[in-house]
Image (cartoon, rainbow, N blue to C red):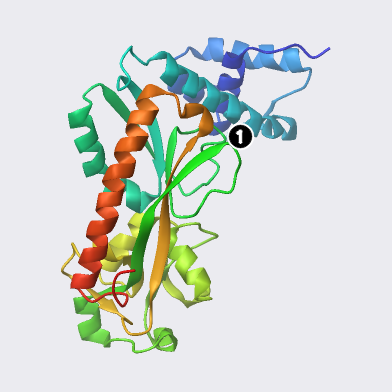
Amino acid sequence: MVQDPAWHLYRSLLAVIREGSLSAAARRLQLTQPTLGRHIEELEADLGKALFTRSQTGLLPTPFALNLVPFAEAMESAAAALMRTAEQGSSSSDGTVRITASEIMGSEVLPPILSALQCAHPKLVFELVLSNRNDDLLRRDADIAVRMVRPTQAALVAQRIGDIQLGFYAHRDYLARHGEPDTLQDLARFHVIGFDRTDQSARAMVKNKLSLDRRQFSFRSDSDIAQAAALRAGLGVGVMQAGIAARMPELVPVLRSTMVFSLDIWLVMHEDQSGNGPVRTAFDGLANALATWVRTQQKDAVSIGCCGGSK
């Protein structure tokens, strides 16, 4: 009969699958290798099935073990959320808040906003996860999400902040060498920066709307940060938020007369967190600061003549 294994056994299972060996997993969890080995043996005994086979490259998870991963990860997320709740103090602004956002939002937009929030609420602790996945909150991987699409899942509280403008840009040195495209069809003669595989970034959404194929991209990456770096390095034409591009004088907007893009920005939390003091404090602070940022970036976009003006 299958027993009911403790959470720490599943945590050890995840560590071994991720690291590929008992020794590496033990270091990650700060346990001894024999202790970790006993965890795996105990879990196998409780479940009545083998979890790993040995190979020359390390431990290989069995198909049964791989089927357990999403459920073990859900337990991992719930355990982390439990710890964040347990660490909260008596104040409504005393505790840890885990936020997820896209790479560009997380690296270019949120840090100064979080800095101001921390000045106002010194006991708030922030954890920032850069991800384009839209199921983070349902999985309890985060408390708050900043997203570019309206969430459709139930049990989520979503607030629309506004819209952000995006456009095509290129480094001025690249344009000096290759000229400037006049139409979308002209892009076939230029180097285009785009995604590598199926991607949910804002850039990919825009390119999908324009029916651009990855075969047209001469630089491919699923990382927003890598795409932005390639754009600033002069590797070709790419898409960027107009407000962010306005801070980079080396970037020049192209296709201004024909290309108009906008994406909604949403702030989301699980409905169960609406009464959580630190999460509520962070959510309200982020909502106000992001609304101000949206208004500012729209003005910046207009000042450089990008995307046909503000909406």
- Of the 4 image quadrants, the one containing the N terminus is top right
| Front-lying residue, 230 or 30 | 230
| Residue highlighted by disc 1 | 56
From the top left corner, tell me how far across and down residue 223 is, in percent. 40, 55
Disc 1 is placed on an element classified as loop
Residue count near mark 1 (Cα–Cα under 10 Å), binned few <14, some 14–19, many ≥20: few
| Front-lying residue, 79 or 43 | 79
Residue at image coords 43%, 14% = 86
Question: From this viewpoint, is residue 33 visible?
Answer: yes
From the top left corner, tell me how far across and down residue 38 is, in percent. 61, 11
What amino acid type should be assigned to the residue bearing mark 1?
Gln
From the top left corner, tell me how far across and down residue 176 is, in percent. 20, 84
Relative placement, left or right, of 103 versus 52 is: left
| Residue 172, image quadrant | bottom left
Q: Name, please, the residue furthest toward the left.
A: 249
152 to 168, vertically: above or below: above
Q: How many marks?
A: 1
Relative placement, left or right, of 235 versus 300 is: right
| Front-lying residue, 289 or 26 | 289
Residue at image coords 22%, 30% = 118
From the top left corner, tell me how far across and down residue 213 is, in percent. 53, 74
Residue at image coords 51%, 34% = 270
295 to 193, vertically: above or below: above
Q: Name, please, the residue furthest toward the right.
A: 1
| Residue 265, image quadrant | bottom left
Relative placement, left or right, of 84 versus 140 is: left
